[in-house]
Each structure stands twice: as structure tokens, then as C-alpha cells.
Image (cartoon, grey):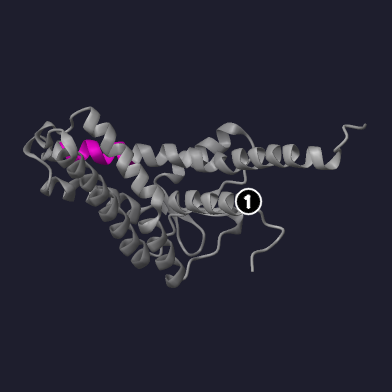
Amino acid sequence: MADPDVSPSSSSSGKAIEYVFNYLNMAGNEKADQFAPLTQKERTRIYWKTMVNPLGYIKAATSAGIDQWGDKPEEWQQGFAGYGKRFANILGQYSIQRTVTFVLSSGFHEDNRYFNSGKGGFWARTGYAVSSGILARHDDGSRHPSVSQIAGVAAGAFLSRTWQPRSQRSAGDAAVSFGITMASNMGFSVVKEFLPDIGRALMKKHRRRSAGPQANPHGQP
């Protein structure tokens, strides 16, 4: 039986938030000082959630559309066939990156989840977030360069050259792809740091709007 205190809209919002957090690999609302090492079972569950998360497919579809608009690479031409190749290319790179990162993080006991800094001040939080784009936690909570994440991004960038057309097959093209993805990871880390704040502000505003008419249905002071 459904919980009578939970509205369908609240349930849908909660599911959407879960999808976002899983896709961004965020450790919920936990802060850095609440870190606890992952078990292999937890690590595997996170991997499968990120692999089947619908947001990943939406992102791949959007990126493929952008490449289709820019006719990149031009050898794949236009039309549904060309779009399908671009979509498969992006999804393939994503899958390689996630899988290599998962395997190596398991072996090296690296945790690439994002924990909120718990710091105060915009620049302190931003600096922590940017560094988190290339760092991972070990089981003791210390942060070091993430071998698993860097290797995963490199694997996706370089191995995908095997199915790319000739114009995109060089090591230089792979290096550019690697650099763009790593820079994107740092940028998304900044988003992850401030996303809970934005979410809380939106939820608070939503609750005020919902509670207002109920608390004062006749508009009396």
C-alpha cells in the first residue's frame, strides 16, 4: 500500500533526485567528514546503477545530436544512420570509461564518489570541487590522484579510436578527447558541490508555496 503522506509528485521528485545523484556519482548529502569506505558489494551496485541510469542515455543522445548538427565526424554523414553511429560512439566511450574505472577502483580501493566539502566560502568550496575532479579517496579517507578515473577516461578516449573514422583516429585526437573529458569532470564537480544547496533552496520554496494556502485558507492574518 502506498504511503498516504507521500504524494505522487513527491515520489517522482525523489526518484528524479536519486537518478541525478546516481548519474553524477554523488554520495547523497554526505559530507567529506562522514566518509566510510565502500564494500565491494556497494561498489558493484553503484557501477550498475550508473550503467543503466536513463540520464546517461539522455546525455549520450544529446551529445550525439550536437555532433550530428556539427557534422562531426563528417564521414558518418547525416540521417538516422549517421546519428546512430554518433550515439553508439558516445555510449561506447562512456561504457569503457565506467567499466575500466570500476575495475581499477576495486583493485586500488579508490572511491570516486563526490562528497560535499562541508567548507564555508565560495572559493574554498570551488577549489575543493575542482581538485575532486582528479582525486579519489582511499579506504583511510585520504585523497590521492585517482588512478582509476584517469585511466578510465584515457581508455575511453584512446580505445574508441579503433572504431572512429580516419579523420578522428590519431593519438592527438584521443588526447584532445581525454583533456575535454577531464576538464568536464572538474566542471561537474563544481556543480556537484553546489547542487544540494540549490536543491534545498528549491524544495524550501516549494514547501512554502504548498503550505501557504493550507495554513491560511481565508487569507486572514
Residue 60 falls left or right of residue 3: left
**Residue at image coords 48%, 66%:** 38
Q: Position of residue 109 (x, y in %)?
A: 40, 65
Left or right of 90 in this view: 7:
right
> Residue 1, relative to residue 199: is it above or below?
below
The x and y percentages for residue 124 are 57, 36
Q: Is residue 70 magenta?
A: no
- The quadrant of the rendering that contains the C terminus is top right
Residue lying at 50% horizontally and 51% vertically, measured from the top left:
21
Question: Does residue 31 appear in the picture of this structure?
Answer: no
| Dominant secondary structure (helix, strand or loop) of the stretch shown in magenta | helix
Q: Position of residue 176 (x, y in %)?
A: 23, 35
Q: Position of residue 99 (x, y in %)?
A: 30, 59
Given residues 126 and 205, the one toward you in this image is 205
Q: Residue at x 26, y 38 (%)?
A: 64
Specify few, some or many for label 1: CA neighbours under 10 Å numbering under 14, 14-19, or 20 or more: few
Residue holding disc 1: 10
Image mark count = 1
Quadrant in which the N terminus is drawn: bottom right
> Quarter of the image holding residue 68?
top left
Task: Report the residue that reaches farthest toward the front.
Answer: 218
Most distant residue in the right direction? 221
Secondary element type, mark 1: helix
Type of amino acid at the residue the image marks with label 1: Ser
Query: Is residue 176 magenta-colored?
Result: yes
As drawn, 157 above or below 37: above
In the displayed orientation, state which residue is furthest to the top: 70
The answer, for residue 64, to whether it is visible in the render is yes
Query: Which image quadrant is residue 40 in?
Result: bottom left
Q: Which residues are magenta?
A: 173-181
